[in-house]
Every structure is written in C-alpha cells, then in structure tokens.
Image: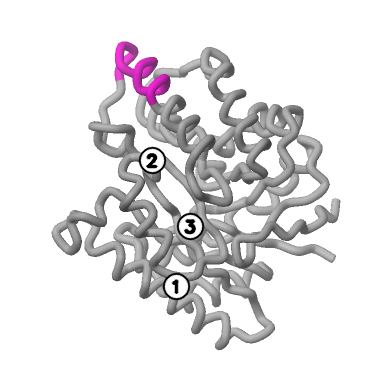
C-alpha cells in the first residue's frame, strides 16, 4: 500500500503563505496524501516584538495554526490525518524565547531550522559574492551544529538552506565537500540524539536537488541516522505534496527502509513500499 506523508506545510498563519489549513487538507486529499503536518513559522527571537515584528505576532499565529489543524483533523475524519506542527526558527539564538514558543501548545511535530545566522538577515535577503559565501556557509553550518547538538526538536529542516538562493541567483557553485567535516558532526549529533533529518523537496523543480542532496542523506545513513522526514515546504495549496514520492525514493536509495511521521512528538516508522 502506497502511503504518502508531507511533514512540512505552511498555512496562511505563516506570514509568507496563502491558504487556509482546510484548503491545504483538500489539496492533499486530491493528491492521495494520507498525512500532513501544518508547520507554520515561528522565528523564536521575534516573540519579544509581539505584533511589532515584521512577521506579525507569532505566538498568536502559532496558537491559531494549532487550533485550526486540530479542527481540520476532526472535520476531515478518515480522509487525512492532520498533525499539529511548527517550524521553529533560530532555536539557539534566545533559548528563553524558544522555550516559550515550545510551550504555546501541545505539538505533534517540531521542525528546527535556521533562516538567518546571528546578527545577519535571512538568507533570502542577502547578496552573495565569491568573497562572502565561504564565510556565510561556515557560520551557518556552525550554528546548525549547535542546534543539532542542543535544541529541542524532532527533525532538522532543509540542512542546506542557503544553497537555494546561492544556486538560483548566482553563478557561484560552492563545493559542499569543503564543509563535510562539520556536516558529519551535524549528522552524527542527529543520530546520537535520535533526531530526524528532513528531505526537503521544495527546490527539486527549480534547482533539481533536495535539501540536503542525496550525498548528504546517504552519509546520514552511513553514520547511523535512523529517521528521515519528507516535506514539500509548501506555501501554497498547489505545492502540497510536490516531489514527495521522489523524496521517498531518495530515502530508499540511500538505504532507509522507512520514512518517519511524528505524532505527539513520537516517531512512527512508515515502510517504504518500493
């Protein structure tokens, strides 16, 4: 039996997404997806700004997101399972605020991510040059290691996040092998702490690879990694489930017999059917 799960989806409770939770559920059902996680954005350091944040009041947004996911799960009945998630950004920047974010609700699933390194804008807004890219990537992976070793989360999102902008917007082609030592440390930390690595499929149709790419996913398995989650990172209903089957196939190719769905913060293994 083919089972599809998309563990990274944003509703209009995220500042950069368009559709309601129910609209996302309907799209998922149309595409044969049996489980989704609504993982709206929580940039933890922004909590202190309340509604003065450029992203809006994220405590209110996440509270609304979780409540809508709960209602949708009841309304959709057996059509689809809707999990209460959150994408927790920059969890190590201000630990007290991160703790507050995690206390907002009872979550099924927490994705950890870094969209901006300390004292720097989101990678989306940066300009990239041959000169600054090596330093940015080094600092990014160092912060990601700190997150992997210490933060409270279930799966580490889009490990190679800066590459989406570097590869799309410039002719710069960083050699990730230059960072394999620290990436190995990140993967080892995930394995030791029994955390998952996300296979993020959002850029497959744009840059042709998952985040991280197949080489890093394979290395995670070699280093003892047990759990992988698959997520489209959809911000619109039409993108729900995009390339999820391709992500599952990559997991299988890399030696994983299962992908993972988290419920009540506990990992449930779903056998890959290939």
Front-most of residues 97 and 116: 97
Q: Residues within 10 Å of mark 1 (few under 14, many from 20)?
A: many
Q: Which residue is mark 2?
A: 92
What stretch of residues is rendered in magenta? 129-139
Q: Which residue is mark 1?
A: 66
- Indicate left or right for 183 with 123 as reference: right
Q: Main secondary structure of the magenta part?
A: helix
Q: Which residue is mark 3?
A: 234
* Residue 160: % across, % down: 50, 33
Tell me if residue 134 is in the magenta stretch: yes
- Indicate left or right for 56 with 229 as reference: left
* Residue 74: % across, % down: 57, 86
Name the mark nearer the viewer: 1 or 2: 2
Q: Residues within 10 Å of mark 3 (few under 14, many from 20)?
A: many
Tell me if residue 143 is in the magenta stretch: no
Q: Residues within 10 Å of mark 2 (few under 14, many from 20)?
A: many
Front-most of residues 153 and 239: 153
Front-most of residues 217 and 43: 43
Tag 1–tag 2 contact (CB < 8 Å) = no
């Amino acid at each position: 039996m083919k089972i599809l799960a998309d563990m990274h989806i944003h509703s209009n409770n995220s500042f950069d997404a368009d559709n309601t939770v129910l609209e996302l559920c309907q799209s998922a059902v149309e595409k044969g997806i049996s489980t989704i996680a609504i993982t709206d954005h929580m940039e933890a350091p922004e909590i202190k700004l309340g509604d003065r944040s450029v992203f809006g009041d994220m405590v209110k947004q996440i509270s609304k997101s979780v409540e809508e996911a709960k209602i949708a799960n009841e309304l959709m009945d057996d059509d689809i399972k809707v999990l209460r998630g959150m994408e927790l950004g920059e969890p190590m920047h201000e630990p007290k605020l991160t703790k507050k974010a995690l206390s907002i609700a009872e979550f099924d699933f927490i994705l950890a991510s870094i969209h901006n390194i300390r004292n720097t804008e989101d990678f989306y807004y940066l300009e990239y040059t041959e000169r600054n890219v090596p330093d940015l990537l080094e600092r990014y992976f160092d912060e990601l290691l700190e997150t992997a070793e210490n933060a409270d989360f279930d799966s580490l999102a889009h490990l190679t996040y800066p590459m989406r902008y570097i590869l799309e917007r410039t002719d710069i082609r960083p050699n990730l092998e230059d960072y394999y030592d620290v990436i190995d440390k990140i993967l080892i930390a995930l394995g030791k702490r029994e955390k998952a690595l996300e296979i993020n499929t959002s850029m497959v149709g744009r840059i042709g690879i998952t985040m991280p790419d197949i080489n890093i996913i394979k290395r995670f398995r070699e280093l003892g990694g047990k759990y992988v989650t698959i997520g489209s990172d959809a911000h619109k209903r039409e993108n729900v489930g995009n390339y999820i089957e391709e992500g599952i196939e990559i997991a299988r190719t890399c030696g994983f017999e299962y992908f993972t769905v988290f419920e009540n913060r506990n990992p449930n293994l779903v056998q890959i059917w290939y």
